[in-house]
Image (spheres, helix red, strand yellow):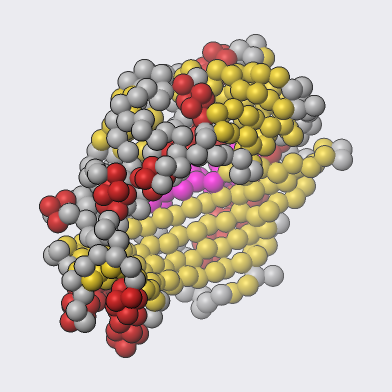
Amino acid sequence: MAKLMAQNTTARAAYDLDQLKQLVGDILQQAKDLGATSAEAGVNSEAGFSVTVRMGEVETIEYNRDKGLGVTVYFGQRKGSASTTDFRPHAVSETVRAAVDIARYTAEDEYAGLADPALMARDIPDLQLYQPWDITPDAAVEMAKECEAAAFAVDKRLHNSEGAYIATHSGARVYGNSNGFVGGYPSSRHSLGCTMIGRENDEMQRDHWYSLSRNPAGLEAAVSVGQKAAQRTVERLSARKIQTGKLPVIFSAEAARGLLGHFIRAINGSALYRKSSFLLDSLGQAIFPDFIEIQEQPHLLQGLGSSPFDSEGVSTRERRIIEAGVLQGYVLDSYAARHLGMQTTGNAGGVHNLSINHQAADLDALLRQMDKGILVTEVMGQGVNIVTGDYSRGAGGFWVEGGEIQYPIEEFTLAGNLRQMYRGLQAVAGDVDRRGNLLTGSWLIDEMTIAGD
């Protein structure tokens, strides 16, 4: 039975960019009037809806209209922050005053403060991040039904479903500070996904597929998404267990994204100044083989990680983080950079469209290169220690022999050390998963310890 969360109308972006900029300006002025030596504020507003269909029936229709603002004020090196979701004038004033009251009584922090004014984004390019989808809930329901139906049609062993969904959201964010910067832009994000459950004898398996894009035209067709979810589920049936040993491992593009994410965590400024990273003091050192390049491209048109400026207003720029395997730079905001005696890299809030180059044409080429080993398509658990680099996670995937997938495997653990895994990277495939901020194909690692039966 459907749960109707709002009136049956198409959700629209609940924002006006000029009004949000004016709100940020008012906040900064109020902070100044209350004696703050400097201040910064961020405001966001978003609207959208999602629908879920399960077993051919509408399960949920949910509408979202979210907004929030945060303000940080400084009295010299003393800092106070407060936030609210209420944009009424008296609520905004109370929030600013709360931040001021906090700042008056906090201890001084020599590293606190706004980003360098010289680094603010002055020219804000249009990165085409706002691509609204003029779709009604009724049309979205039909598309989700089509997706799930296409999945069920793939194989009779698909006896159940966790549903197919459509989601569309758009909105805007504005950031400003008392150094004279106020900037903002609208954005959109749309997704389509499906999760299926298959059964063979007494065994059940589940798997999913989804498509994500800022532009609705960039989404995969609903039928294709359903078919991929179904095929991935069916391929997992009749999974076997494997023996403990040491083997080469391929991480599928989805799983490899996690390995790239662990690398970014390890070179993040907050981990570095706390001395809690296995890549501490690694600048200028070889982290990967010499054929690996990792770059950040913040200004890709319609990129899911694109942004003209970071969450401190610092202009983003393209750069190489790994060149010829060597670490060229860290991922820093202003606070971490001051701790390290360095300059912000424009990464307050995270990285922007990080990508790694590839050597193999596709996953099939990588399988042939490996010849015998394991293809990992799913990892689970929290066994990653960024301080030491130790890596131990449960996994599922496929046994590979003769350069071809032989059968599904399950209930095994991967163990290694991230530093050794990065140095042992043999090749990256061109099957790039573009559904996020970290863009990578599948990885072939020379050897890992497999704990099975």
Q: Percent from the top left, x then y, of residue 432?
A: 45, 32
For the C terminus, the image quarter is top right
**Numbered marks: total:** 0
Judge whether 191 appears above or below 388 on screen: below
What is the quadrant of residue 271 in the picture? top left
What is the quadrant of residue 282 in the picture? top left
Q: Nearer the viewer, residue 340 or 231?
A: 340
Q: Is residue 445 magenta?
A: no
Kindly tell me whether residue 325 is visible in this rendering.
Answer: yes
Q: Nearer the viewer, residue 400 or 321?
A: 321
Query: Residue sitting at 41 percent across and 23 percent down?
Result: 288
Q: Nearer the viewer, residue 294 or 398?
A: 294
Query: Residue sitting at 46 percent across and 34 percent down?
Result: 278
Left or right position of 9 against 69: right
Q: Percent from the top left, x then y, of residue 304?
A: 38, 47
Judge whether 348 appears above or below 234 on screen: below
For the N terminus, the image quarter is bottom right
Query: Residue sitting at 50 percent across and 19 percent down?
Result: 424
The residue most toward the bottom is 90
Kindly tell me whether residue 43 is visible in this rendering.
Answer: no
Left or right position of 29 against 44: left
Q: Percent from the top left, x then y, of residue 286?
A: 37, 22
Q: Percent from the top left, x then y, of residue 384?
A: 57, 39
Left or right position of 335 against 140: left
Q: Nearer the viewer, residue 441 or 37?
A: 37
Query: Residue sitting at 38 percent across and 80 percent down?
Result: 86
Residues drawn in magenta: 210-231
The residue most toward the right is 202
Q: Is residue 225 magenta?
A: yes
